[in-house]
Amino acid sequence: MSRSRKSKPQREFSAQRVKNAAKRKKRIHTVKIALATLVATAFAVLFLMPIILTITNSFMSSSEISANYGSVFATNSRGGKVYISEKVNLKFIPDMVSFSQYITVLFKSPEYLLKFWNSVVLVGPIVVFQLLVAALASYGFTRYRGRIREIIFFSYIILMLMPYQVTLVPNYLVAGWFKTLDTYWAIWLPGIFSPFAVFLLTKFMRRIPTSVIEAAQIDGAGEWQIFKRVCMPLCKGAVCSAAILVFIDYWNMVEQPLILLSDAEKHPLSVFLSKINSGEIGLAFAVATIYMVPSLLVFLYGEEYLVDGITYQGGIKG
């Protein structure tokens, strides 16, 4: 019996080995976290640099911008771009803060505000009604399944996988048949019935346990009550996620207005930004900064909902 038991030095040696192994494992884990943090920080800096550069340069004067980036935006006598032989001076801190660009954009040139309002008019109804259509359609796909409905849902997925450039010509032809070309309806209708939000909400609603819906039916709830008081509250995160993604997608649209709206007065600011000539680079920085504000505010306000809507697996959270 005494042979099967370890002596005190042996027990202490074994305990020390376990402690050393735990310390090594902890050090390795710490090093991995540090490396991952450094890599994430490097990518974050790379992604944020253009945004920071745009915001800071919007407070520069036109002469300073020309001195730093003149070679980038230089053109020849025919209006074409020239070869850049000089080094560009990327500058994050202006020599003297100037608000002249914002004064011009906000007070002296109403054209920019008109284009900004066009963006709001185009995107707002798309976000609201796409979510409304998607919520109702998703509930139908979730509650009533069958071969025909699965085929329709599969068609939604196929349409969602297609880039918008592929469906742009059919949309143009359909808009011509419905006499909606050169009107906001040419942008609204394809956006409202876009399949993305339907797909996202359907996959989310199908994760809701059937026991929750059955309990509501036992309590006497009808389909509208189940949709309004059970499914939609549980899908709040997914709805917010879809709203954020749809808003950012259509807020930056360019191809649709260029093809479907021939009247330049109806174009959003995203299209107008690409048309600012080389003599208004400072204004381009200021307008781009103003144009980024809604997207940044929407993302920062709904970041928690966005993450929750993507990671939540359905059911009831405690």
Image (cartoon, helix red, strand yellow):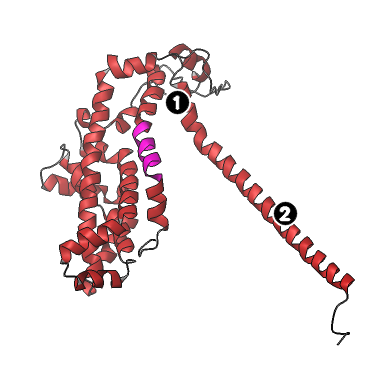
Tell me, yes or no, if residue 53 can be seen here: yes
Q: Secondary structure at mark 2?
A: helix
Three-letter residue code for mark 1: Ile
Label ID, residue 27? 2
Q: Indicate the position of residue 222 as horizontal and vertical percent values.
A: 15, 67
Question: Is 23 rendered above or below residue 179?
Answer: below
Label 2 close to label 1 by CB (< 8 Å): no
Q: Please name the residue that numbered disc 1 is placed on.
A: 55
Q: Residue 151: where, in percent of width, then height?
A: 25, 69
Q: Quadrant of residue 7?
A: bottom right
Answer with mark 2 or mark 1, whichever residue precedes in sequence.
Answer: 2
**How crowded is the residue under tag 2: few (<14 C-alpha within 10 Å), some, or many (20+)?**
few
Does 95 sit above or below residue 176? Answer: above
Viewer can see residue 78:
no
Q: Amino acid at mark 2?
A: Arg
Query: Residue at left 36%, top 18%?
Result: 102
Instruction: Please indicate whether residue 96 sits to the left or right of residue 181 in the image.
Output: right
What's the magenta region?
A: 293-303
Q: Main secondary structure of the magenta part?
A: helix
As for residue 222 lying within the magenta part, the answer is no
Tell me the crowding category of disc 1: few under 14, some 14 to 19, or many 20 or more residues within 10 angstroms, Cα based. Answer: some
| Residue lying at 46% horizontally and 32% vertically, measured from the top left | 51
Left or right? Give the position of 152 relative to 161.
left
Residue at the location (24% across, 55% down)?
Answer: 134
Judged left or right of residue 308, residue 27 is: right
Q: Find out whether residue 302 is within the magenta segment.
A: yes
Which residue is situated farthest in the bottom direction here? Answer: 1
